[in-house]
Image (spheres, rainbow, N blue to C red):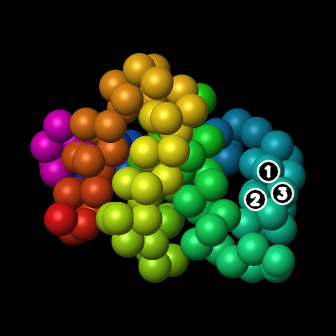
Amino acid sequence: MTEAEVMKFYAGWEADSEKVQKAMPDMVKGFGTLFKNTMKADILDVKTKELIAVAIGLALRCQPCIYLHVKKSIEVGATRQEILAVAGVVVMMQGGPAYVYMPMLLDILEAMGENE
């Protein structure tokens, strides 16, 4: 996967989100409120919550979740090493089904400028 392909996902996601917003504004509003209230800092900081979201995205094999929460993790200060440590725990717990998503995860990190 190239950097251009990763960035294409993010651009496409914005367009897809706008379609959903127009079709289901009440649902989007409700989900947005849930997201905002859940992902704000409280007993856990935002970085920890985003790393948990990366782990769940990998465990559930949700590609959009992986893309979005890796990006958000980096934006709130997570390092490549922290994201890879979380991914390692997911692989340890889930084995092959999580392992096959590691190349995609590495491509996303590289596209976000998180190289070695």
- Gap between marks 1 and 2 measured at Cα: 6 Å
Q: Nearer the viewer, mark 1 or mark 2?
A: 2
Amino acid type shown at disc 2: Phe
Label 2 with label 3: CB-CB less than 8 Å: yes
Residue at point 37%, 29% (across, down): 99
Residue 116's quadrant in the figure? bottom left
Q: Which residue is mark 2?
A: 35
Residue extent of the magenta highlight:
1-6
Q: Give the residue furthest to the front.
A: 92
| Secondary element at tag 2 | helix
- Gap between marks 3 and 1 measured at Cα: 5 Å
Which SS does the magenta portion mostly show?
Answer: helix
Q: Position of residue 86 (x, y in %)?
A: 49, 53
Kindly tell me whether residue 20 is visible in this rendering.
Answer: yes
Q: Nearer the viewer, residue 86 or 39?
A: 86
- Specify whether 30 is left or right of 77: right
- Specify whether 40 is left or right of 81: right
Label 1 with label 2: CB-CB less than 8 Å: yes
Residue at point 65%, 74% (across, down): 46
Residue 27's quadrant in the figure? top right
Q: Is residue 87 above or below residue 113?
A: above
